[in-house]
Image (cartoon, rainbow, N blue to C red):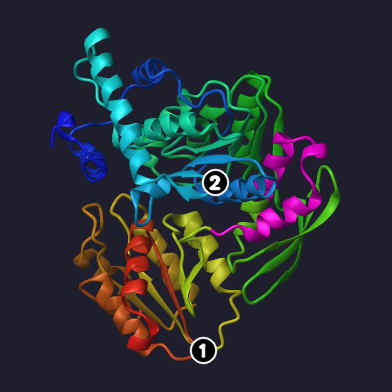
Amino acid sequence: MKLEEVNNYENAVSYCLMIPRFSGKNNPQITKRFYAFLGEPGSNAKIVHVAGTNGKGSVCAFMDSILRENKNTVGMFVSPHLTDIRERICYNREWIDKDSFYRAFDTVRDKLKQFRETENEREYHPSFFEMLFFLAMVFFEEKRPDVIILETGLGGRLDATNVISHPVICVITEIGYDHMEYLGDTLPKIASEKAGIIKRKIPVIFMDKRQETTEVIKQRAKELDALCIPVSKEDANLISIGDKHIDFSYKSRYYENVGITIRTKAVYQVENALLALKAVETLLPKEEISQTVLQNGIEKMHWEGRMEEAAPGIFLDGAHNEDGIQAFLDSVSTDGCKGRRFLLFSAVSDKQFIKMAEMIGQSGLFSRIYTAPIENERGIDKAQLNRLFDSLKETVHVDDVKEAYYLMRKQQQSNDYIYVAGSLYLIGQMKKYVKELPNDQF
């Protein structure tokens, strides 16, 4: 489909999904030039820029929930999507509507045509991620939210979202090993790429978890005279882990100790909530944010695919790298399951899937592990999946995800838990099958 042939929402989505086939990553300079040519839409809002390896989406969602509880209007751009491309672009947590998506696409298309002609850049085309970022900013320019929350895609320094030159705060979540072919093969190298979002004299809130990454972030902040605000597990006193919630006490900069409840079984969400709380308290003065707003905003947050209970006893978690899998296993180990645990695992080929499988196998948490290839060209094939858990007796290799889900549900008894992890693409598929195969079919 040619760009000029797109004439409705469905065409626009199809075109966007085709972009990776003919457009690679662009030089950041031309991305910045085109954003300027668009008129820098959305740049007059208060922009919060979020980078990191794990937890970016959750931190964005926590901040969004707190700010909306505070009666602020919020635009949010995140990735990837699970079932619908519009999930990536939200206003007050509602997906961009189809008409607005097409209008934004039409605006970007017209400007792209002009840019090619007037700037002598006839070969330029936004990448898939860049196109969606531009659509988001055009949409936010129309909606005029009080705050825009932008999640980086890959890295930070070279990310399309880094064309934003004046965010109000920057947030860097936990940094671990992922996308090493692009970001570097050591944690300091990866941290350096993530720290590329830090701007001169703009506060940066970051997860102080590993000394080698903390030093990189602090050094970059020092170079840019940016206020550096570390967040660590010391900012919370864990009170209790319940069946479907976690209670802890947060050391607030405004209200001393604040009792916080997170509606999830995922222990790792405590760190993400801490980052969001600290970020909001850095963004807003005390007179504009109450203790009750902080508490209610955190408790009301719902983020799909992160230890999400999609149906009774069925948990979907998007863990897709070593740190993510470790956090997932930590949460599973405290789940209070009184029966058996089943796991469906799959992954994409550019992840550390062998190491992830080793960690899962060594945990001894699962009575039976199922594997199935995901419906994505990046997914590892069935032969590779079959070899991952060779040393385990209770492993079931299935041809597709839907069949694996059906088999697990048929085996599940009242006290058993089913888990799904390894890839957000896998989670997207599973959400569809959970809806298609209701409980009364088992």
Using residue 315 as the reference point, say whether residue 352 is left or right of it.
Answer: left
Instruction: In the rendered structure, find residue 146 and report the number of the disc placed on it.
Output: none
Relative to 77, residue 115 above or below: above
Q: Secondary structure at mark 2?
A: loop
**Front one among 365 and 62:** 62
Residue 265 at what x, y percent from top left? Answer: 59, 69
Residue at numbered disc 2: 92
Residue 209 magenta-highlighted: no
Cβ atoms under marks 2 and 1 closer than 8 Å: no
Mark 2 neighbour class, 10 Å CA radius: few under 14, some 14 to 19, many 20 or more: some
What residue appears at the point 75 percent right and 62 percent down from the top-left corner? 248
Q: Which sits earlier in the primary sequence, circle 2 or circle 1?
A: 2
Q: Quadrant of residue 266?
A: bottom right
Residue type at the position of mark 1: Asn
Residue 299 magenta-highlighted: yes
Q: Residue furthest right?
A: 256
Residue type at the position of mark 2: Asn
Relative to 311, residue 252 above or below: above
What residue appears at the point 45 percent right and 66 percent down from the top-left corner? 359
Q: Residue furthest bottom?
A: 413
What residue appears at the point 35 percent right and 79 percent down from the top-left corner? 392
**Front one among 162 and 223:** 162
Magenta: main secondary structure: helix
Residue at numbered disc 1: 415
- Screen quadrant of the N terminus: top left
Magenta-colored span: 274-302
Residue 234, can we see it? no
